[in-house]
Image: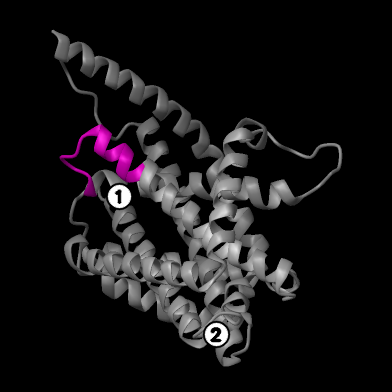
Amino acid sequence: IKERPYKQPLNQTIDILAVIATVMGVATSLGLGVLQINGGLNSVFGLPNTAWMQVAIIVVLTALFLTSTTTGLDRGIKWLSNINLGTALVLMVFVFFAGPTIFILETLTLGLGDYLQNFIRYSLRLQPYQQGTWVRDWTIFYWAWAIAWSPFVGAFVARVSRGRTIREFIVGVLIVPPFIALLWIAVFGGTALYLDLFEGTSIAEAVNADVTSALFVTFAELPFSFILSVLSILLILTFLITSADSATYIISSMTTNGSLNPPLPVRIAWGVLLGGIAAVLLIASGLEGLQTASLISALPFTIILLLMVFTLFKLLRQENVRKIK
């Protein structure tokens, strides 16, 4: 059977869309993370919350993740990822026990039940009659943001999951991380809700004024607030570094015919481009610009994702028939 050449127009178009979606998705994450870091520095150290301060943070962040990405998957990225996970778990466990533990567990149970009961309704919810913008600005934005990340995350997870079974992949990617995310939201969100409802704090008002201050205003009501805030800023920074250096590696691989070891100049070029796009979006239009960038880049790739789902089922069916024979 004569194999079809890889670099056909359709394949090239899909690759280009994947690169664009990944670049914009990661740039959006960098921008949002930088806003969070700047909010933390403003709350803890009183540094100005301005566009130029955010650009300075991006410059430092870009330099750090470029340093990390030059070490490859088995050193810099792996070490930082392990440190991130351990630090995040320690932080979550501390807030769980230092905060309203029973209320957090009740919130987790209530939220999980509400999600399972209303999954379909929430998935199809829009506001055409009220002309509201909340669903568009947040729910649809987060969908688009996840879709924009999908080329990078799919390729990266496939790269580090080589040799594992589909069952192990599903447990490690689709079950364990969402469960940890549910715990994280219940612990920190539940603590903030409890403080506002029963302790007379004004966390919700602070969030309305500046959404990036929510975490640090919550920490101000807990023991060791300064240490928690500084640790959180460092945690956000290292999370961004691991995300950006992994994305730089995968984008470089995408643009060098799938190379497992992309040339260093290519990785540096893509890293600088990621940081530059994030800086431009922040200076030009802030949070709204970041949301719009994700929506635009994710729209064309949504169709490709649906086709990939169909293709995956087709390949699995063929593999099953091959095993039976």
x 60%, y 85%: residue:
43
Q: Which amino acid does label 1 sit on?
A: Phe
What label does residue 76 carry, if any?
none
Residue ID for mark 2: 41
- Residue 168 highlighted magenta (yes or no): yes
Vertical position of residue 128 compared to residue 264: above or below: above
> How far apart are the two marked residues, 1 and 2, measured between alpha carbons?
31 Å
Q: Is residue 113 left or right of residue 201?
A: left
- The question of residue 322 being in magenta is answered with no
**Residues in magenta?**
160-173
- Residue lying at 28% horizontally and 16% vertically, measured from the top left: 317
Q: Do the residues labelled 1 and 2 touch (CB within 8 Å)?
A: no
Q: Which residue is drawn at 16% across and 10% down?
A: 324
Decide if residue 147 is in sight here.
yes
Quadrant where the N terminus sits is top left
Establish if 272 lies above or below 321.
Answer: below
Q: Position of residue 236 (x, y in %)?
A: 45, 72
The quadrant in which residue 235 appears is bottom left
Tell me the quarter of the picture where residue 88 sits.
bottom left
- Residue at label 1? 156
Which quarter of the figure is the C terminus placed in?
Answer: top left
Specify few, some or many for label 1: CA neighbours under 10 Å numbering under 14, 14-19, or 20 or more.
some
Q: Can residue 276 be seen in this view?
A: no
Where is residue 69? Give x, y as percent.
27, 67
Q: Earlier in the sequence, mark 1 or mark 2?
A: 2
Front one among 160 and 215: 215
Secondary structure of the residue carrying numbered label 1: helix
Mark 2 residue type:
Leu
Quadrant in the picture for residue 307: top left
Task: Determine the secondary structure under disc 2.
Answer: helix
Residue that appears at 74% across and 69% down? 208
